Amino acid sequence: MSLGTLFPSLSLALYVSLCVAESVDEVRAAVRRARQAGKIVGFVPTMGALHVGHVSLMQRARAECDLVVTSIFVNPTQFGPSEDFTRYPRPRETDLQICGESGVDVVFYPTVETMYPAGHRTYVEVGGLSEILEGAIRPGHFRGVATVVTKLFNIVQADRAYFGQKDYQQQTLIRVMTRELDLPTEVITCETIRDPDGLALSSRNAYLSPAERQSGLSLSRALRTADALVAGGERDVKRLEAAMRRELESTPGVKIDYAVIVHHESLAELTAAEPTMVALVAATVGSTRLIDNWILRLPRKS
Ligand code: PAF
């Protein structure tokens, strides 16, 4: 689904009331006013380059909260030295327009200096979960995510924060961190939004050429294969993983990072099937890393 379909006439008029806060004090003041009026505050943290997946999070926050705050911040500490921090898209005006059209009240749009003043040296690490899967391939990535999300939660002090299931390990880690640091924000995970052909929406999909995009469809195909096998009675985790790998390996231009089935909360490897599991896949297509996941549920015995 394209943004054009969702907003056929993107108009400036609808977002004149959008408040763009660049400093911590400004966003805090807006949230304080709302709280004093007894309002529920919802928060959607993003790195911008907004797509329909982000819009769905904003709309859910809009439906459930009185004040909706979004942050747009391309967080340097979650990118490795050879990753795409400098080329990550930053379409400021379009992003603000999308926020306004999606019912956001306040956009927190800080600079790197605001979030990380010179001499910044405090980081948050979630032991174990930060080092496996995405963390093993992108060392330091989750330390950057955990640090910036903790800072954003402390700045915004929302009642609820909305994340996509698409970044499954990220939302797991944020849930654990929020619980273990007693952060008073409720973490809400919303389902992955996909294009009609199955590709999970991601800001990085914009890097894909048409041929790479076709290859990228192998990720959701691999996940659906595992789901169909489970529905058909397959209970051997290794055979399920092998089926996903076969799907990815048979697609030209796809370099697999992992294709695994893990525990849905601990993300620990499984030797035997559990009632609820999650299949996680990650691969590089051309120069773009794609990730996707699928919850696998064993049918209940009647
Ligand atoms: O998922 C993202 O967009 C980012 O990792 C997040 C949570 C906004 C932190 O920078």
Image (spheres, rainbow, N blue to C red):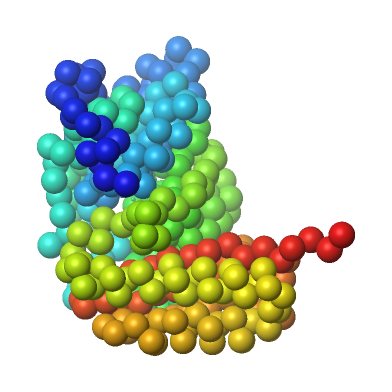
Q: Report whether 13 appears left or right of 155.
A: left
Left or right of 292 on screen, residue 262: right
Q: Nearer the viewer, residue 270 or 73?
A: 270
56 or 147: which is nearer to us? Answer: 56
Q: Is residue 251 left or right of residue 236?
A: left
Q: Is residue 27 visible?
A: no
Looking at the image, the residue that sits furthest to the right is 302
Residue at figure coordinates x 50%, y 28% from the top left: 64
Is residue 64 shown left or right of residue 229?
left
Q: Position of residue 193 (x, y in %)?
A: 41, 50
Residue at left offset 25%, top offset 32% = 7
Q: In the image, what residue occupies the spot 34% across and 83% down? A: 251
Question: Residue 180, can we see it?
Answer: yes
Q: Compared to 135, does 294 lie above or below?
A: above
Spot occupied by residue 136 in the image (x, y as percentages of width and height): 41, 79
Depicted 133 relative to depicted 56: above or below: below
Q: Position of residue 115 (x, y in %)?
A: 25, 47
55 and 140: which one is in front? 55
| View extreme (top): residue | 37
Q: Is residue 49 above or below residue 134?
A: above
Q: How many marks?
A: 0
User: Could you say where residue 208 lies in the image, as x and y percent from the top left?
Assistant: 20, 67
Examine the rendered structure and indicate whether residue 99 appears above or below residue 75. above
Quadrant for the C terminus, please: bottom right
Q: Residue at x 68, y 73 (%)?
A: 232
